Image (cartoon, rainbow, N blue to C red):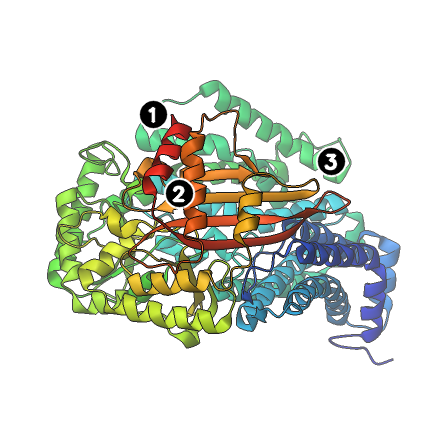
Amino acid sequence: MMKNKFFSAGLYREGLRQMRIPGIALACISLLIALIDLFNYNGVTSQISSTSLSIAVILALYIATPAMVLLGFNFLNSRRAADFYHSIPQTRTSLAVSFFAASMTWSAGSVLMNALLSILTVSLSGVAVVWSEWFIFIANALSALLLLNSLGLIAVSIATGAFNQLICAGLIAFLPRMLINNFGDLASQAVPVLTGLEDYLGRFAEFEINPIFSDNTRDMYSCLYGVVLSAIYFTIGLICFNRRRSEAATQTAMNKGVQCALRVLVAFILCIYPCQELSRCLINTQSVDGSGLLLSYGFAIIFYYLYEAITSRRIKGVLRVTGEMGIGLLVLAALNLLFIFGPAVVANSALNANLGPDRVAAVVLTHPAANETRYEALSVEGVELDDEQLIEQLCDVLDGNIKTIKAGKNPTLDRISGMTNYYFREYIYVQFRLNDDSTATRIIYPSKKEKEAIDASLCDNEQYMSALRAFPKWEELTLIDSSSIVDKAMLRDLYKSLEEEVTSLPDSSFLAYINDTYSGKLYFPAPKFYTQDTMHTKYLSDCFITLEGYKDGKFWYNNYQLNGYLPKTYKLYTEYLNCPRNMSTDDFLRFTSGVNDGEFSYVSIECISPKVPENLSASCALGFGNGVPGDIDNYDYDYEAMNRVINDIVKNWNKKPNSSDAYYRIDASYGVYDEAGYESGVREVFIVPCTDVDSFIQTMESQSA
């Protein structure tokens, strides 16, 4: 009979049947999560874009997928079953591919069902679907599933027994990433100018790029990484599967070398802690807890022999220290030495690397790995700056930092306040492009004077400022959102106004704006002689426009705060936010004085005005819950002043907001409780002009006293 060389429909159906229990369970969980998302949908959005998979779906995937692979290939653990499957008129490749496809069908089908149901249920409400983002989301999910199934194929091909196979899959999935991150962290702790192993391995050293471990479902790099790694793992698994013989079903692994590797790597996990402590001791000459190290190594050695006893199911001969067990101990010792001395070697290499201005051809301002990156940072990241003055300044700062480290001091400490620069963004990620086309990424920590000089050079660099000021085009957007405004025409108008105002800001105002309204890990130069202007930075809690999209395959996310820098967009926003307003003055008064049984109301009142002190701003809003002033037992309100605030709101209820006025921002949720006690209602956010700021301040002062 002719053998199927690559795929068999009959074996595929048999695989689906054998894996049906975990497959159906995963499908039911995915369906349930999609329905829960539907009931939790609040309707306050104009577009639906993808987000991370629910944690429940992720856990189900991580449990069900390995279970399906183990069930499908369980015949490899029985000599009789292995003989049967190896004797049927199918090639080994056809057998492996068919069962692999069955496992992928169950897991991928569940994820696709979850995603498509989520899209369908929300889009039925008239919400636009951001198909490009959903495509990347689904691609990342399928990439993670490919990786999980490929790991399973390797595990079942080189080990025997569910316990051994799970250990094998876990080691392949977690151990390389664990070692890379721990090794890199030790090196960067010794030399704070190092970024970790990204300097040597690029993006492949980033933990988040692996789709199994990442919650970033918006990055095509993660998807491509998963597909490439899956192809490598699948090929290895297929080769091992074809080489495996029926008699391997009675052994703990394909050969003694594989079993020795599993034994050594499992024991090495217990050695990571003492390796870290000894490495830090070597680098920083700090003392270590000798008893703790001995205890950890003692457990590692015990587990080394215990693992062999568990997997081989025999005691006799396990305690021998010669032959393969002795060789394994030598390998384990070598791994310990590599992990102890390796970070010190990397750190020493970085400290002595020549990154002087004469070797640097250009610099690129990069940024740390993050799930959400601003558009400006991605624009700047692609620009090579060859300004000689800037290169010399950055090299001088790096040289000074290295001298500080060699002197046994920490360059991350601010030289005036003693606070760590990291938390104040007083650091810059720089990629140095050398004359020989190699690169070196470093984190530099400039002093205040050095930072001002670097900022001045960047601000005078036309190439840099042009890239930094690039504004996302309408065609690049996958999402535009702004508080409770859902009308598409209004959102398009807001985008046009935002683009016009941001792009027309003078350089100094633009830099002040992005420094004031963004807090994160990205470095943006401040304008010369810049001081924060609280008149400009006053903004409403929900007063912003969110833009999302992709640039060169990377996801970016910008929140544009609408404040004094953007008065036209601010004014347009306030007009749209109040159109239409469904709440009446009677409703407002009722919800701030008392509600009927079975109803609920949550009303928050903020006053935005330069007269309101910082400590009495948005975070200290007047709160009403179910018609009773919030935390009434804890605060001694000035009720006379509070009533004046409410009367002021009612008096100005129908007045058109003006961007030069003070504002009340009212955030009101109201509705009824159903029989099960769940809330069912609506939320409104709107603005009313304020003419009695003093009463608001008086009320807030009584609350905060």
User: Considering the numbered disc 1 on the image, is that residue within a helix, a strand or a loop?
Assistant: loop
The answer to whether one can see residue 430 in this image is no
Tell which residue pokes out farthest to the left in this image: 389
Residue 390 got which mark? none
The reply, left or right, for residue 539 in relation to residue 307 is left
Amino acid type of the residue that numbered disc 1 sits on in the rendered structure: Gln
Residue 618, which numbered label?
2
Please provide percent x and percent y for residue 378: 35, 64
Q: In the image, what residue type sits under mark 2?
A: Ala
- Number of numbered tags placed on the structure image: 3
- Disc 1 target residue: 286
Relative vertical location of residue 580 with respect to residue 612 in this rendering, above or below: below
Marks 3 and 2 close (CB-CB < 8 Å):
no
Separation (CA) of disc 2 from disc 1: 47 Å
Q: Secondary structure at mark 2?
A: helix
Reading the image, the residue beneath label 3 is: 310
Do the residues under discs 2 and 1 have CB atoms within 8 angstroms? no
Query: Alpha-carbon distance for marks 3 and 2?
Result: 61 Å
Q: Quadrant of the C terminus?
A: top left
Q: Residue at x 54, y 67 (%)?
A: 47
Q: Percent position (x, y) of residue 379?
A: 32, 66
Q: Residue at x 52, y 51 (%)?
A: 585
Viewer-proximal residue, 457 or 339? 457
